[in-house]
Image (cartoon, grey):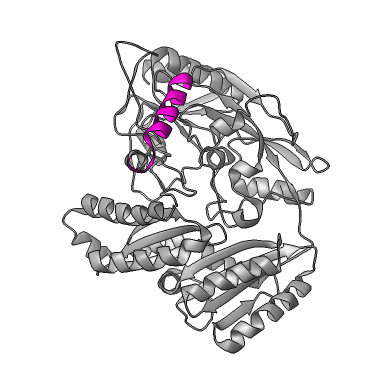
Amino acid sequence: MTDHASTLGHIKDVTVLTAALDMAPHLIDWRKRHTGQAECVVFPSTTQAVSEVMAYCHANRIRVFPQGGNTSVCGGSVPDGQGGSIVLNLSRMNRLREINPDDDSMVVDAGCILANVQQAAADVDRLFPLRLGAEGSCQIGGNIATNAGGTAAVRYGVMRDLVLGLEVVLPDGTIIDAIKTVRKDNSGFDLKHLFIGSEGTIGIITGAALKLFARPRGMTTAALAIRDIDTALYIARDLRGALPGEISALELLSDSEMEIVREFRAEGALRMRQAPWYLIVEVGGRSTEAEYRDILETLLMPELESGALTDAILAENERQRGEIWGVRHSVTECNMHAGMGLTHDIAVPIGKLDQYIKQAEAELAEAYPDAVPVVVGHIGDGNLHYIAMFTHEAWAAQTAQEAVRDHVGHMFYDIAVGLGGTFSAEHGVGSIHTGDMERYKSSSSLRMMRDMKAAFDPLGIANPGRMLKFSIDENALGGEIENE
C-alpha cells in the first residue's frame, strides 16, 4: 500500500482498496469504452470522512475522481490514464436521512440508488418522479452532478427541478451545508444551482434534499405504431394539449430501434404491427386507470380510423405496462449487442424535431451509407438520442475509427446547434465532450466557467479533464489560469 493510500485508510469511516483485482471494476465504465488508472479507490461513509479525504488530497495535490454508480455514457465516471490519482466512490453513503410526506420532501445521502429513493417515497404514498433506464444502479449524487433528465421530464422536469437543497464538500475539504426543504428562499445566491450539473468539478455532492409529489390516483401507458414522424409529433402535441399536466412521458422509438429490441431482448418486443415510428405515452393524475384508458381511446380513435396510427396497445394492468416500459428501458443494452452505436444526446426546440430528424438522416446516408439511423428519445422536451449504428463488421472495417466518431458527432451536433439546440441534453459532458464545449460554447461562457472552476478548485484536483478544459500555471498556483 502506498503512503497516500495508507494515510487515507486511517481516516475514520474510510475504506481503501489498492489491490488491482478489487479496483478493476471502478477503473472501467459499464460499456467498457473508457478505462483509467488510480492509486487507490476510497470509500467514505460520512460527509466528515469525505471532507478529510478532500483536505488531504488538496494539501498533497492529489487528483480526485468522484464516482457514483458508474453509469456515465460520457466517460465521466472513471479516472483518466495518468495514474497517481484516487477514485472517491460514494456508494457507502447510502442513508435515507429523513422523509416527510407532510412537507413532500426527503433528505438522502448522495450514494443512495435511485430505485431505492423511488421506493422510499412510494412507501409513504409519495412519488419521486425521476425515471431512468439505469435507476437500479445509478446514484442520486451522480444524477444531480449530471442534471439527469429521464422519461418523466416532460411533466416533472429534470433533476435541477427536483432538488431543494444540497450538502457539498469543496475541493479543499470545506463542507457547505445548504440542505433545506423550503420552497422559497430569496436570501442571496442559490448555491445549489452551482453544483447541479457541475459533474464534480467544483465540489463533491454528499447529500441532497429532494422534492416529492402526490402519487397519481390512476395511470396508464400506451404504445402507438405511427406512419411517419410528422404524425408522431402532432399526436404528441395534441395529447399534451388535451391532457395538460397529466402527460408524464412521450417516448419516441424508430423502427430501426424496435428491430434491434426484437432481435436481442429475450422477452421480445411488443406484438404490434410494424411501423416507421413508435410512441410510448404515459398519462396519470386525478382520473382512474380505467378512465384514462377511455380518454386515450377517445382521443386516438380518429387517428386509427384515418390510418395515421397503424396499431395501438393500451395497458390494462401493471404487467402490460411493464412490458411496454421494458422495451424502452432495454434499448441501451440491446444496442450494445447490435453493433457499435455512436450515440448523440441532442436537444432542439420541440417544433424543430421533425426538421432535425430528416436532416440528420439525409446527411448520415450520404456520408456513411453502411450506418443505420437509430432513434430513441424524449420528444416531450425535445431530447433525442440519435444513434449512427454500425454492425460490428462495418465498424471493424473503418480504418480511422476516431475520425469517423468525431465526424459523425460534429455532423449531428452542427445540425442541433444550428436549429437552436445543444450537443448535450441530459447525459452531461464528461471527458468525451470537452472539445465540443470549445466548439459550441461562446468564449464568454467558457471564460465564466473557468473563472468559477478557478474560484472553487484553483489546484484543479476535482474531476480533472471532465466537462471543462482547465489547466494551472505551475508558477502561479491559484493565480493565473492558462486556458487550453
Q: Quadrant of the N terminus?
A: top left
- The residue located at (60%, 46%) in the rendering is 114
| In this rendering, position of residue 274 left or right of residue 34 | right
| In this rendering, position of residue 281 left or right of residue 29 | right
Q: Which of the pair 41/139 is nearer the observer?
A: 139
Quarter of the rendering containing residue 220: bottom right
Quarter of the rendering containing residue 474: top left
On whether residue 449 falls in the magenta region, the answer is yes
**Residue 6 x %, y %:** 43, 17
**Residue 233 x %, y %:** 53, 70
| In this rendering, position of residue 344 left or right of residue 365 | right
**Residue 140 x %, y %:** 59, 41
Would you say the magenta stretch is mainly helix, strand or loop?
Answer: helix
- The reply to whether residue 265 is visible in this rendering is yes
Q: Quadrant of the C terminus?
A: top left
**Residue 83 x %, y %:** 31, 28
Q: Which of the pair 22/199 is nearer the observer?
A: 199
Read off the magenta span: 439-456
Furthest toward the left, the residue is 399
- The residue located at (40%, 63%) in the rendering is 335
Q: Which of the pair 100/21 is nearer the observer?
A: 100
- The reply to whether residue 393 is visible in this rendering is no
- 133 shown above or below 463: below
On whether residue 118 falls in the magenta region, the answer is no
| In this rendering, position of residue 344 left or right of residue 300 | left
* Callout count: 0
Furthest toward the bottom, the residue is 305
Furthest toward the right, the residue is 102
